[in-house]
Image: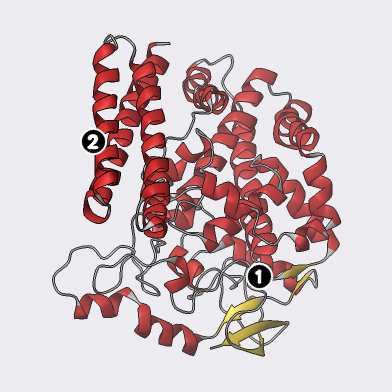
Amino acid sequence: IRLRMSIKLIKIRREEEEAKQQQKQQQQQVLKNGDAQDVAKVVAAENSIKTDTAALPDTTKPTTTSTTKATTTTTITTIETTSSTPTATTEKASTTTSSDDHYEAPIVWKNIFLFIVLHSCIPAALSLLADPERRPQWRTIAWAIAGMYISGLGVTGGAHRLWSHKAYKAKLPVQILLMLLQTMAGQNSVYTWCRDHRVHHKFSETHADPHNIKRGFFFAHMGWLCCRKHPEVREKGKLIDMTDLEANPVVMFQHRHFWWLAILFTVYLPTMVPVWLWQEQVWTSFIFSFMIRYLFTLHGTWLVNSAAHYHGTRPYDKHMEARESPWVIMFGLGEGFHNYHHTFPFDYSTSEFGKYFNVTTALIDMFAAMGLAYDRRKMDKKSIELRQIRTGEQLAKSTSTGSKSNRGTDNDGKLLEPDERETMMTADDDEPRGELKQVSRKLVSPFSLDYISGPTSLQYTM
């Protein structure tokens, strides 16, 4: 209760300061462009505000805020109707009142409570490990680790590369498998996941970005799930084309029945498999097979939103926050090549070099070798090198003027908008800006990305 009261008091004080600042801006505008009548009205309004504020006791801050807001609104309306230049003044007032540079999102206490409960599984797991009678069997721990990785592949190979970016196509058995694995990961339905991710790519690092890294590392990691979405996120989300997923029966079946499927595949089956197969204790299996597995799967996905936008190199495009993060590559099943991915989001491998460990790409190539995946889209080497020369961070370092950080800016330090990032491919684009050609590729081993002649995939040249 004290925390909520403190938040309300802080919000009230900020509203008072914003109202006063808006009033001062309007007064300055009138004094600059208005006539004597306008100036007299502004002075009278200011005196009225001072009189009303002085008449109120100190304990009525909410009332003071309401009075100030009402008087400010009246002043703005008077200026708009009586100023000698109504058009310019109206635009100024509109700009002032619609500013959302400072946005306080309402807290979602339900999610915070769930996250607290979920993270409480760590001390519970440690206590079980310390108790010889309730200690989990090694097979239970192995099952939890395996579940973490296979459910993560449903997110990276399914929700991300297949459905969000349409980087490759898959036949029905693979789609059903990836849908069930993504359900096991428990990260909302595929439809919701893809909508938020497409908004993230199209409006990256703006107010419309659901997990905007410019609002801080914690916000991009998990804080965005602890509060309501910014109004821009909801507004821009309505503009995203989702017709391809709405026409997909697998995706829409999961979306309609997600909570029932989540109870079954996220909680019940992972918990009961160790109980059925090797007589593990139910509580021990619940802590390790569900809660620990689910917690680490979530943080693995969240690291892509936070760490991969915060620390690392930008060899392909220095104008964006997405970075190449070696640590996220391991925990994110190959999703850590993030500067490359945001530069060429249609590339099914999300990386340039095959020597790195990329489990998701290996899985897709295995499906392709079995004839279950096809039309894999890939950027050609020459176009990648040209893009590196044009916008990569290495060239920026050699020509920089001593700035230690050039995050999200051009050479002059100006913040770039998403549509100014040259040749950047967004999630909504049906085809990349390039020429399509076919190349023969075949996976040599499950964990190698070296290829010989074999099944075809699609490759693009700029």
Q: Quadrant of residue 147?
A: top right
* Label of residue 140 in the image: none
> What residue is shown at x 45% (from left), y 43% (from top)?
221
| Residue type at numbered disc 1 | Ala
Does residue 277 sit above or below 40 in this rendering?
above
Please tell me whether mark 1 or mark 2 is closer to you in this view. 2
The quadrant of the rendering that contains the N terminus is top left
Q: Nearer the viewer, residue 36 or 346?
A: 36
Query: Residue 409 at x, y = what percent?
Result: 31, 67
Q: Is residue 334 visible?
A: no
Q: Is residue 408 left or right of residue 303?
A: left
Q: CA distance from mark 1 to mark 2?
A: 62 Å
Q: Which of the 4 quarters of the picture holds residue 91?
A: bottom left
Local crowd size for mark 1, using a 10 Å CA cut-off: few (<14), some (14–19), many (≥20): many
* Sooner in the amino-acid sequence: mark 1 or mark 2: 2
In the rendered view, does 253 fall on the left or right side of 133? right
State the scheme by which the image is colored.
Answer: secondary structure
Residue 8: x and y in percent read 39, 20
Q: Residue furthest front?
A: 37
SS type, badge 2: helix
Residue type at the position of mark 2 = Val
Identify the residue at horizontal 28%, vertical 45% (top origin): 37
For label 2, count other residues whose C-alpha is less than 10 Å away and answer few (under 14), some (14-19) or many (20+): few
User: Any mark on residue 43, and which?
Assistant: 2
Q: According to the image, label 1 marks what residue? A: 167
Q: Residue at x 71, y 30 (%)?
A: 267
